[in-house]
Image (spheres, helix red, strand yellow):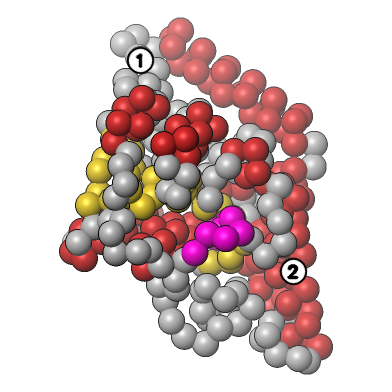
Amino acid sequence: MVKVSEFLKQHGKPSREVYLDHENSGWVPPEVVEAMLPYFNQKGYGHPSITNLPGWEAYEVVESTLEKVNKTINARDGELVITHSGTEANNLAIIGAALASSKERKKIITSAIEHVSILFPARSLEEHGYRVVTIPVDKEGFVDPDMLSMLIDHETLMVSIQMVNHEIGTIQNMKTLVETVKDKNDRIIFHTDAVDAYGRMKIDVEGLGVDLMTLSSHKIHGPRGVGVLYVKEGVKLKPVMHGALSTQKMWPGVENIPAIAGFNKAIDLTFTNFEDNVEKMKTLRDMLMKGILNNVPGVLLNG
């Protein structure tokens, strides 16, 4: 097997690099790196749940970051859980809701184009008597609200449909889908994976009516290693991991304070001049798509 180091050596460094995979992950801006560095060895290096100065400094980073996320999605204090990735937040949403549910409600509905961090946890529950129903999408990736309504019954525990698709970029009509579910049965938990929507479009959890929502730091050029799960007040989850708790009641382990500090700064960069940033992104997207469609034969826009 060829080692990656050998492949990199053979490939060499291109004279000019054009990186087009920011959806998966991207570079971290210097301002974010600079915000992280002090928390490795200058301040906030203590345990955030311990009452000493470095611990208080660490906890202040957690507190400040949660406040900023709250403001950007219109959530309330106490409705956010920090995890170590979006994948972990999705697992907590799917499996945590199942563990907290009554035994007669064992049906989970999700779409055919969800991220595997939704599909795999849901399917893992089939070994424990849960039934996972995968709703198909149309050629542009949209979920049909009428079809969704037909699938809902008294056994349905939760519905999980991502806000923006990670492959073809479909933006679901989330409010319509939530209303479809709640009108049929308001006990059903509605989760949305919004990692590819956060920082690219306005999100109002109160207005949407979602019960659970996943975010991820590295999707807005923050560092890897920080995820967030929004849990609407009153929605019951049980932990899926166990150990010593720090500041997060639903997710054990010591928080990665440097990474959270970086996420904090990435939020500032993303949501300062937010409308202008989004318009610039849309302009660049349209230029790229127009250039490809006009100059490369046989290309179809998917999504």
Q: Which residue is mark 1?
A: 300
In percent of width and height, residue 54 lies at 77, 86
Query: Is disc 1 placed on a helix, strand or loop?
Result: loop
Q: Residue at x 34, y 9 (%)?
A: 297
Q: Which quadrant of the rendered structure holds the C terminus?
A: top left
Horizontal placement of 213 versus 157: left or right?
A: right
Q: Is residue 132 above or below residue 256?
A: above
Query: Is disc 2 placed on a helix, strand or loop?
Result: helix
Q: Is residue 205 above or below residue 300?
A: below
In percent of width and height, residue 264 lies at 72, 59
Q: Is residue 272 above or below residue 140?
A: below
Residue 35 appears in the picture as rendered: no
Q: CA distance from mark 1 to mark 2?
A: 46 Å
At label 2, the amino acid type is: Glu
Q: Residues within 10 Å of mark 1 (few under 14, many from 20)?
A: few
Q: Residue at x 26, y 40 (%)?
A: 134
Which tag, 1 or 2, sits closer to the chain's start?
A: 2
Horizontal placement of 21 versus 257: left or right?
A: left
Identify the mark at residue 63; answer none if there is no mark.
2
Q: Verify whether residue 151 appears in magenta.
A: no
Q: Which quadrant of the rendered structure holds the N terminus?
A: bottom left
Identify the mark at residue 106; answer none if there is no mark.
none
Magenta-colored span: 227-236
Residue 187 appears in the picture as rendered: yes
Q: Mark 1 or 2, which is nearer the eye?
A: 2
At label 1, the amino acid type is: Leu
Q: Is residue 254 above or below residue 65?
A: below
